[in-house]
């Protein structure tokens, strides 16, 4: 039997083509000290939810925005002129013995995680949203991607994802920058009464 995978979920992976500079590292170090617990027994997250609006991170923001729009154009091939912009961005700090539960991002089209510091065993897990047959929820494996320093993982914001509990013998702490997006431009069609324009 042949199985045709009609509706796969595209996940983009891209490496930052440069190292973080000293100024960016300094800002991230300051942000890491201004955090709170995001979930019970979960990771730490910055109080600042717009970290990429900090002037010293503007070049990083431009690179990430460009990469997200490349993914968006290549995967979705919009028929009208649209571009995505970053709405919120924050730093996550995951210590040994902690993780982050399964979740998705509301009020966002695409989400991205940029990895700043990781252990070689760090991963991001995704929920297999195709494991429901009728009203029966089937148990299945949890797809995961190995992550590495200076890589971006881009995915539809509705895709549920998690950070598994970090082993106690992991090196350092896991530090990532997460963000959400929305669009500028026009979608739909005036003749079918589906037109929507976001400025």
Image: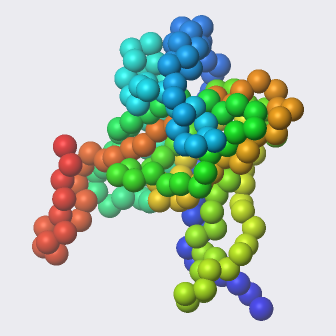
Q: Quadrant of residue 142?
A: bottom right
Question: Which image quarter is the N terminus in?
Answer: bottom right
Asked whether 47 or 124 is in front, the reply is: 47
175 relative to 177 in the view: left or right: right
Question: Outermost residue, front direction?
Answer: 40
195 relative to 24 in the view: left or right: left
Q: Quadrant of residue 167?
A: top right
At 36% across and 58% down in the image, what residue appears? 78
Give the percent coordinates (x, y) of residue 102: 59, 55
Q: Quadrant of residue 21?
A: top right
- Classify 12 as above or below 177: below
Q: Is residue 94 visible?
A: yes
Give the percent coordinates (x, y) of residue 49: 41, 31
Asked whether 143 or 68 is in front, the reply is: 143
- Classify 77 as above or below 93: below
Give the percent coordinates (x, y) of residue 37: 54, 34
Question: Which image quarter is the C terminus in?
Answer: top left
Say how the picture is coloured.
rainbow
At 56% across and 20% down in the image, what residue appears? 32
Asked whether 181 or 65 is in front, the reply is: 181
95 relative to 108 in the view: left or right: right
At 83% across and 35% down in the image, what residue appears? 168
Q: Is residue 24 visible?
A: no
Give the percent coordinates (x, y) of residue 35: 52, 25
């Amino acid at each position: 039997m042949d199985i045709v995978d009609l509706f796969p979920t595209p996940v983009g992976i891209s490496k930052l083509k440069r190292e973080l500079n000293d100024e960016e590292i300094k800002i991230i170090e300051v942000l890491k000290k201004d955090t709170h617990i995001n979930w019970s027994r979960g990771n730490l997250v910055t109080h600042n939810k717009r970290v990429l609006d900090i002037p010293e991170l503007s070049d990083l923001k431009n690179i990430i925005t460009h990469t997200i729009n490349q993914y968006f154009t290549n995967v979705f091939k919009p028929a009208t002129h649209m571009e995505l912009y970053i709405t919120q961005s924050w730093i996550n700090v995951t210590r040994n013995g902690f993780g982050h539960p399964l979740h998705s991002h509301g009020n966002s089209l695409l989400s991205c995680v940029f990895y700043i510091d990781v252990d070689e065993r760090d991963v991001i897990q995704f929920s297999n949203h195709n494991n429901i047959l009728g009203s029966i929820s089937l148990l299945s494996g949890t797809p995961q991607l190995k992550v590495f320093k200076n890589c971006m993982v881009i995915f539809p914001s509705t895709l549920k994802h998690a950070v598994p509990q970090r082993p106690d013998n992991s090196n350092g702490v896991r530090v990532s920058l997460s963000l959400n997006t929305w669009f500028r431009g026009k979608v739909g069609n005036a003749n079918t009464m589906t037109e929507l324009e976001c400025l």
